Amino acid sequence: MKNAVVLDCDGTVFDFEGLFCKKFGWERRHFVNLEMRYPNKAYEIELFSLSSRTYEQLDIIEMGVKIARFCDEIFDIHFVTNRPSHTTQVTGLALKSNKIPFKYLSVGENSKIRRIQRISPLFIVEDLLSVVEPCADLGISSFLIDSPWNQKDGLHPLIHRIKTFEEFLVLYTVYFKEFIRA
């Protein structure tokens, strides 16, 4: 049985941020909460975030796709996302149509941390501090995709910030030597 790793969807392999910014604007990206960026557009943002159509239109993030493909031969890949649960089919189809490998998919608004904890992954790949910090407290290593909304000094030692696939490979080699492909 292979070890499990967990990848997030949006901000990791799919560019939700890019589509959001095209529709609403590129300001105040340091806020992870979309309604805080544009408080006067809360209703429109909620409709955008809940629409299955939104998730059908997302571009891929090449770095995240490369990470998934790299991990595919070594690990069981679990995608765990806080997308609305009614987007499960759209999410699975998007992963398959973009040839992004995975073994399991967990979609829904219920506790992402608990879902990750149940999987007990070797590491996660994620863009949200609100996910990687509690996971680090549970002893789970994280690769944090560098984004405007997750800038913070003094990260937990189990959180590794990455900007490129090459940075991921270097850190992977340092921290997970025993899983290096021959």
Image (spheres, helix red, strand yellow):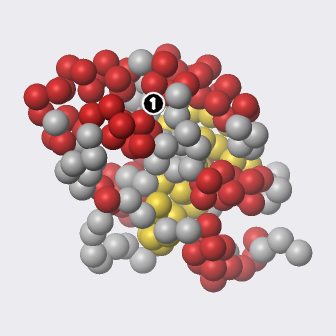
**Looking at the image, which is closer to me, 176 or 32?**
32
Element under label 1?
loop
Can you give x and y, in whole percent of width and height, for residue 143 in the image? Answer: 51, 64
**Looking at the image, which is closer to me, 1 or 99?**
99
Compared with 80, 124 (above or below) is: below
Q: In this view, does 109 lie to the left or right of 178?
A: left
Residue beneath disc 1: 83
Number of numbered discs overlaid on the protein picture: 1
**Looking at the image, which is closer to me, 101 or 53?**
53
Which amino acid does the dot numbered 1 rest on? Arg
Q: Residue furthest bottom?
A: 174
Residue at figure coordinates x 71%, y 43% from the top left: 100
Dividing the picture into quadrants, the one containing residue 48 is top left
Can you give x and y, in whole percent of width and height, for residue 99 in the image? Answer: 75, 40
Can you give x and y, in whole percent of width and height, for residue 63 in the image? Answer: 60, 58
Residue at figure coordinates x 58%, y 44% from the top left: 60
Residue at figure coordinates x 67%, y 25% from the top left: 93
Compared with 13, 164 (above or below) is: below
Residue at figure coordinates x 78%, y 74% from the top left: 180
Quarter of the image that includes the C terminus: bottom right
Q: Which residue lies furthest to the right in this view?
A: 182
Tell me if I can see residue 116 in this picture.
no
Dividing the picture into quadrants, the one containing residue 78 is top right
Compared with 97, 134 (above or below) is: below
Can you give x and y, in whole percent of width and height, for residue 9 in the image? Answer: 53, 42
**Looking at the image, which is closer to me, 112 or 92?**
92
